[in-house]
Amino acid sequence: METSEKTRGVKRATAAGIIISVLTMIAIFKFTETHLTWKIIYELNPAYLSLAFISHFLFWILWAYRLKVLSSTLGNNISFSYAFQTSLASGFLAAITPSSAGGEPLRVKMLNDKGISVGASSAIVLAERLLDAIFFISSLPIMIFISDFTTKFGIYSGVVFTIFFFLFLGFLYFAFKEPENVEKLAVKIAKIVKRVIRSKKGERITTAITKELFFFREASVQLTTIPKSHIVFLFVITSLIWISEFLVPSAILLALKTHPHWRESIASQLFLVIISLAPITPGSSGIAEAGMLYFYSLFVGKEYLGSLVAIWRTITYHTNLFIGLLVNVKILKSRYLDR
């Protein structure tokens, strides 16, 4: 009964994400359509369109490679194929949960399935997101300077993101700096758990949470002590991950036989990825499309906008849904049906 309810929930979330995305794209296409729009679509350059898909595929590969490297840093070796499978599966979850960063729990679960503690798995996934955040914060002012492309909304989003990032870092530092602080945090969590679950099960949950918090602290401390050269290498991988994804719109513009606007496009993608973290709709459907339209309308001709947004969202969102769904079905089949 519970499994059936979860399945229905996944189906509803998937349907909601697709419907919101498609309706938004239809509305955008309707408002940006000109007499040149269909001519442009019919004359798409297949080589550059393939390049856009390859660029997104490279995003998946690099993300999986970084996950493998981070895991091995903590002495937990996982195969590249498993890291790739984990990245694709969590990409599906991110596409059906609020915000674009909803796949983390599944990555933690799949790492835990390989014998890595929940605490250490959480530290690995958190390290991924911290690397991403550092890349966004450091790249945004550089790209604004290089491209001379700014919007009040984009700047405001970037500033808010940066403030929350440093507040979160401060919380992590003070909460996990000393073992005593972890104990205090565990006590507070225990009080909340015992209010909700008053049986012995509540005590077992509290004990498990406390243990994983210490595993998390241990793994986090270990990550902060890795050689600087290793940190630089991880940051280079992170940079390549996002650059490959940010080049997708420019490749699409080339496929549409217009100027790629490399610098303005990358700056816009930085603004967009920060905005899409807002937990409002499944996979940020609607928000991503509307944001894309807003930023790119400032430097791309109206006749290209509808096609650009539709193709970009198909490549970066709908393929995540489709491929991620296939991977999740394969995982479920191998674990439960093939036994």
Image (tube, rainbow, N blue to C red):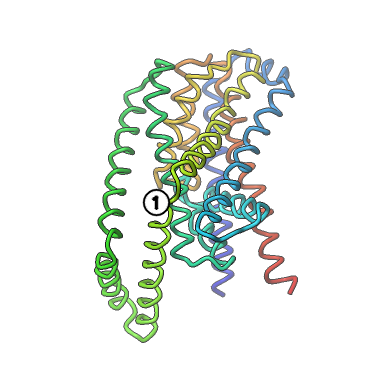
In the figure, 44 relative to 228: above or below? above
Q: Residue 243 versus residue 66: which sits nearer the camera?
A: 66
User: Picture coordinates of residue 293 (x, y %)?
Assistant: 48, 26
Vertical relation: 310 (above or below) 260: below
Mark 1 neighbour class, 10 Å CA radius: few under 14, some 14 to 19, many 20 or more: few
Q: What is the quadrant of residue 182 in the picture? A: bottom left
Residue topped by disc 1: 224
Residue 66 falls left or right of residue 201: right
What's under tag 1, amino acid-wise?
Answer: Thr
Question: Where's residue 90, x and y in %?
Answer: 56, 53
Q: Residue at x 50, y 22 (%)?
A: 265
Looking at the image, which residue sits at the far bottom?
200
**In which quadrant of the rendered image does the N terminus lie?**
bottom right
Residue 165 horizontal side relative to residue 321, left or right: left
Q: Residue at x 37, y 66 (%)?
A: 213
Front one among 292 and 165: 165
Name the residue located 56 percent from the left edge and 68 percent from the top edge. Answer: 115
Residue 121 image position (x, y, % from top left): 49, 60
106 up-or-down from 291: above or below: below
Residue 223: image location, x then y, percent: 43, 53
